[in-house]
Image: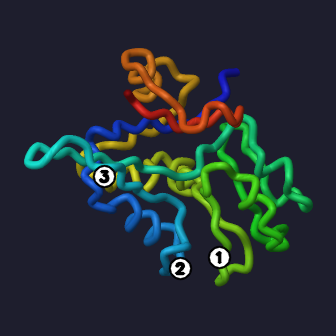
């Protein structure tokens, strides 16, 4: 049996910082308003070049759904878990709000949701993908920065992109084995 391993490939050269991914995520997942509440984000990189020939780039981010999860290791109640398909989860009814997982995450991909009284984070919109839909951020992106799929399927778009183009992961030196891949 070939288990699925969900992953995301991001082509940052296509990102225009429209924030459609962030808005779609907040609406889809009922993320409370506020700067500190985020499941995904877009970071503005430094300007490059000299006036008048300037360039700007952006780096989308979210939970990396790591293969080696520091957040899971530090959770005292096992509220943080990982599905067989690689999706890192938080069971809010088990979460005591200690925020150890937030401190352990090197990607700052978690926040404390006051409304539910638990830590929250990206789930790749598991409620959508398990019924055959794409994560909200992927479906909404007008420039198709984000590509989602099964890394264990050699015919999936994520597998084809990673086989064809050079790529990197963020903070590889941390040993977390992230499953968000950035095309170079």
**Which sits in the foreground, 172 or 95?**
172
Left or right position of 89 against 39? right
| Quadrant assignment, res 37 | bottom right
Residue at 66% over, 31% down: 173
Left or right position of 155 against 54? right
Q: Under tag 1, what secondary structure? A: strand
Coloring basis for residues: rainbow
Residue under circle 1? Answer: 113
**Which sits in the foreground, 36 or 97?**
36
Residue at 80% over, 73% down: 97
Circle 3 residues within 10 Å: few <14, some 14–19, many ≥20: many
| Contact? badges 2 and 1 (CB < 8 Å) | yes
Q: Is residue 133 above or below residue 120?
A: above
Measured in 3D between alpha carbons, the distance from the residue under mark 3 to the one under mark 1, in whole angstroms, is 25 Å
Q: Where is the C terminus found, in terms of image quarters?
A: top left
- Of callouts 3 and 1, the N-terminal one: 1
Residue under circle 2? Answer: 32
| Contact? badges 3 and 1 (CB < 8 Å) | no
Horizontal and vertical percent position of residue 172: 61, 32
Q: Where is the N terminus found, in terms of image quarters?
A: top right
Residue at 67% over, 40% down: 66
Circle 2 residues within 10 Å: few <14, some 14–19, many ≥20: some
Q: Residue 141 carries which label?
A: 3
Q: For the image shown, how many numbered marks are present on the structure?
A: 3
- Of callouts 2 and 1, the N-terminal one: 2
Measured in 3D between alpha carbons, the distance from the residue under mark 2 to the one under mark 3, in whole angstroms, is 21 Å
């Amino acid at each position: 049996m070939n288990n699925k391993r969900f992953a995301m490939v991001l082509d940052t050269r296509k990102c225009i910082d429209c924030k459609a991914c962030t808005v779609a995520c907040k609406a889809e997942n009922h993320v409370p308003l506020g700067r500190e509440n985020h499941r995904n984000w877009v970071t503005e990189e430094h300007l490059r070049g000299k006036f008048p020939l300037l360039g700007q780039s952006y780096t989308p981010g979210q939970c990396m759904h790591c293969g080696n999860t520091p957040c899971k290791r530090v959770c005292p109640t096992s509220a943080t878990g990982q599905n067989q398909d690689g999706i890192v989860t938080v069971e809010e009814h088990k979460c005591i709000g200690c925020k150890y997982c937030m401190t352990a995450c090197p990607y700052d991909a978690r926040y404390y949701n006051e409304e539910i009284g638990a830590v929250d984070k990206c789930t790749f919109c598991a409620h959508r993908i398990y019924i055959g839909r794409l994560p909200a951020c992927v479906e909404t992106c007008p420039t198709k920065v984000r590509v989602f799929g099964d890394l264990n399927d050699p015919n999936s778009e994520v597998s084809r992109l990673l086989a064809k183009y050079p790529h990197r992961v963020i903070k590889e030196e941390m040993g977390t084995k992230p499953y968000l891949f950035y095309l170079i």
